[in-house]
Image (tube, rainbow, N blue to C red):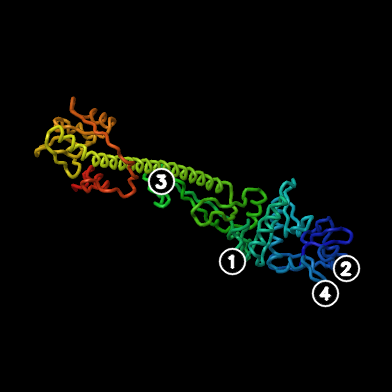
Amino acid sequence: MVFVGVHGEWGRIDATQADLGCGRARESIYKATPPAPLTCYECAWRLHLVHKTHGAYDLWFLRHAGNAPHCEARLAGEGMAHHLLKLDLAHHARAAGWSAEYEVAAPDGSWRADVMATSPDGSRRVALEAQMAAIPITDIEARTDRYRAAGVEVCWFTDRKTVPWLDHVPSVRIARPDDGGPVQITAGAARFVPEWCEDRADCGLCECEDCGPGIDAPLPCGGHGTWTTADPFPLDRFVAAICANTTRPHRLRAKGRGDDGTWRWTTRSYFEGEEEQVRATARREQVIDRLTAVQRRRREARKAAEQEHLAAIAALLQRQKALVKPVVEFVYHEAGAYPGVARESSPEYAMGVPVYLRGKPYAVICPVASRLPALRNRLAPLVLFAASERERGRIAAQAAPGQRVEVIAVDLPPTPPPAVPQPRDQAGLTIRQAVSRMVGLDRM
């Protein structure tokens, strides 16, 4: 069965309309003698007008005469469910004030719409496609793209319970109630249910993995709204909303709900609700990026400071080790007796290496200048040794006024990077052990 045919004198006719869409009485060709000159627009085979009832439907359609050849138009119109849905779609579009034609083809044959609904001013065309048979996702996407390229909007309708392409193109599922009530939209239309934290500046519902690596700071709420399937509602209301442009196909954008990127029909208010959440999510991600960058810079600064600190300690140990022998010779020539040198530096001597003469403290090799003020009075009688004039200046600035600071210049090899295992000093102390001693970890 098909709805559209060609009359030998009147041209294109629409069997579903009382005036055949051309201002002629439908009864004038029904069971006419001789038969009306009706042919199929696709295969040019002879057609005749048929009238029958199906439930609440008063059906008028065209049927191919016997022995008709293979015909795409006849195959497209097979199936009562397909036939009735096309009738409903055209009827609802006309009820909304639009014109509706069956089997409208593109000039180049790239598409053919089951029902082409056109706005009164001609500015919008919407293909209403009854897709009751199975079709691959790639095929229906390609057909949708051809409509889009031609400037034609499209909505696909199906009554199949399992529709793998429902999420991939603008489409809805319909159902006919057993009690004969109006056809219902049961899937494909959605509404956005917003949800926000009470304090939008401090998200209380975020999950730890969403907060970024190691961020310990209030984060703005990015929204926790979700898309839900709209409750069933009548087909005529949906078609009228398409014509009024109050419902439109939309690719869902709210992230993290498992349905982002799918096609759904929705209204402006729901779209705006989602849009608010999308913007809030973007702002939240910007805050996370900024905080992450700040914390990364802080970690890098701490690491650099630690490396610098370790390098300073390594250099200190190297200077202390290099000065042991020259200091011993210096004290011997000055005091006439060989001194004793401690095996390692000591916090009691500002992390310098103490030198003893006749069992009493006599000098300190390379003390840490910043530690001298707390020990100034105790160390004031001692000689302080430095490995360079620069180090002497730092030590003298923190030592007791007038305290003796001697410089014994020595050639020092470049200090290796702290990450490389360091050789032990003369007392067997490693860099890590020296750090532990300086911060007091060796006493815990």
Give me the C-alpha separation between circle 2 and circle 1: 44 Å
* Badge 4 element: loop
**Amino acid type at image mark 4:** Asn
Residue at the spot 20% in from the left edge and 42% down from the top edge: 345
Residue at the spot of label 4: 67
Q: Can you say whether 319 is above or below 241 in the image?
A: above
Secondary structure, mark 2, is loop
- Residue under pointer 3: 203
The answer to whether any part of residue 414 appears in the image is: yes
Marks 2 and 3, the one that precedes in the sequence:
2
Where residue 443 appears, as percent x and y from the top left, is 18, 47
SS at mark 1 in the image: loop
Q: Which residue is mark 2?
A: 35
Label 1 sits on residue = 162
Residue 347's disc is: none
Image quarter for residue 306? top left
Count of all numbered marks drawn on residues in the image: 4
Q: Say whether marks 2 and 1 touch (CB < 8 Å).
A: no
Q: Amino acid at mark 3?
A: Cys
Comparing marks 3 and 1, which lies closer to the viewer? 3
Cα separation between marks 2 and 3: 76 Å
Q: Of the residues under marks 3 and 4, which one precedes in the sequence?
A: 4
Residue type beneath disc 1: Thr
